[in-house]
Image (cartoon, helix red, strand yellow):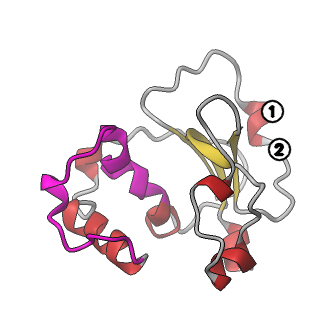
C-alpha cells in the first residue's frame, strides 16, 4: 500500500492466534531457560514482560503483507502532535526505528546478553542499547532484502 496513511486500532482479542502457547514457543525456539513451564503460571515482577502484544511485533509482516511501513504505538502512548515527521524518517534500510533506552535503569546489551556466545558476539554490539517498545516504526521492505 503506497501513499497516504491508514490507521487501524486493534484489540488483543483480534489476534486469537497469539496465545500463551505461541509465547511459550517463542521462548523455546530462542533457548530460554524453563521454556517448558506453562507461561500462564509463570510469575514475573513486571507483567508487561508477558504481554501478548509484546510478541505481536514479530507477526507484523504476516498480518499486513501489503504494507511497506508500519508505525506501531502501544496502548499507553499518548499522541500529542502530528506524526508526519516520524513517518518520514529515513531508516536507511534498517527494519526498526525506536527510542533508544540507555539511561536510568536501562543498560547496554552487554548487561543483558551473553557475549561469550559466538552468534551473539557476531550479531550484537555490546555497547548498543535496547529500545523502548512503546513506539516503533517498522520498514517491512527491509526484511525482504
Residue extending furthest toward the top: 80
Q: Locate residue 47 relative to residue 3 in the image: left or right.
A: left
Q: Quadrant of residue 80?
A: top right
- Which residue is labeled 1 in the image? 85
Whether 124 is drawn above or below 109: the answer is below
Q: Secondary structure at mark 1?
A: helix
Tell me where residue 113 sits by quadrant. Answer: bottom right
Residues 45 and 18: in front is 45
Query: At x 42% / y 31%, what residue is drawn?
Result: 75
Residue 45: in magenta span = yes
Rendered-image quadrant of the C terminus: bottom right
Examine the rendered structure and indicate whether residue 96 appears above or below residue 21: above
Where residue 126 appears, as percent x and y from the top left, is 74, 61
Q: Which residue is mark 2?
A: 89
Residue 26, placed above or below residue 7: below
Q: Report the Cα–Cα distance between label 1 and label 2.
A: 7 Å
Q: Is residue 116 visible?
A: yes
Few, some or many residues within 10 Å of mark 2 (<14, 14–19, 20+): few
Query: SS class of the residue under badge 2?
Result: loop
Q: Quadrant of the N terminus?
A: bottom right
Is residue 69 visible in the rendered structure shown here? no
Residue at x 82% of width, y 44% of height: 89
Q: Residue furthest front?
A: 116
> What residue sits 78% from the left and 55% below the top?
127
Task: Please give the range of residues in magenta.
Answer: 31-57
User: Which residue is pictured at 69% across the width and 49% down the height?
Assistant: 108
Mark 1 touches mark 2? (CB < 8 Å): yes
Q: In the displayed orientation, state which residue is furthest to the bottom.
A: 118
Amino acid at each position: 500500500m503506497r501513499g497516504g496513511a491508514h490507521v487501524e486500532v486493534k484489540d488483543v482479542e483480534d489476534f486469537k492466534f497469539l496465545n500463551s502457547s505461541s509465547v511459550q514457543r517463542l521462548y523455546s525456539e530462542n533457548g530460554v531457560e524453563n521454556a517448558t513451564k506453562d507461561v500462564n503460571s509463570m510469575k514475573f515482577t513486571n507483567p508487561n514482560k508477558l504481554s501478548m502484544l509484546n510478541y505481536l511485533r514479530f507477526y507484523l509482516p504476516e498480518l499486513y503483507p501489503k504494507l511497506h511501513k508500519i508505525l506501531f504505538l502501544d496502548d499507553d502512548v499518548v499522541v500529542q502532535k502530528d506524526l508526519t515527521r516520524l513517518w518520514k524518517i529515513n531508516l536507511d534500510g534498517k527494519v526498526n526505528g525506536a527510542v533508544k533506552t540507555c539511561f536510568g535503569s536501562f543498560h547496554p546489551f552487554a548487561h543483558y546478553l551473553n557475549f561469550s556466545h559466538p552468534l551473539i558476539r557476531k550479531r550484537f554490539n555490546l555497547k548498543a542499547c535496547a529500545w523502548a517498545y512503546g513506539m516503533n516504526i517498522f520498514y517491512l521492505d527491509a526484511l525482504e532484502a
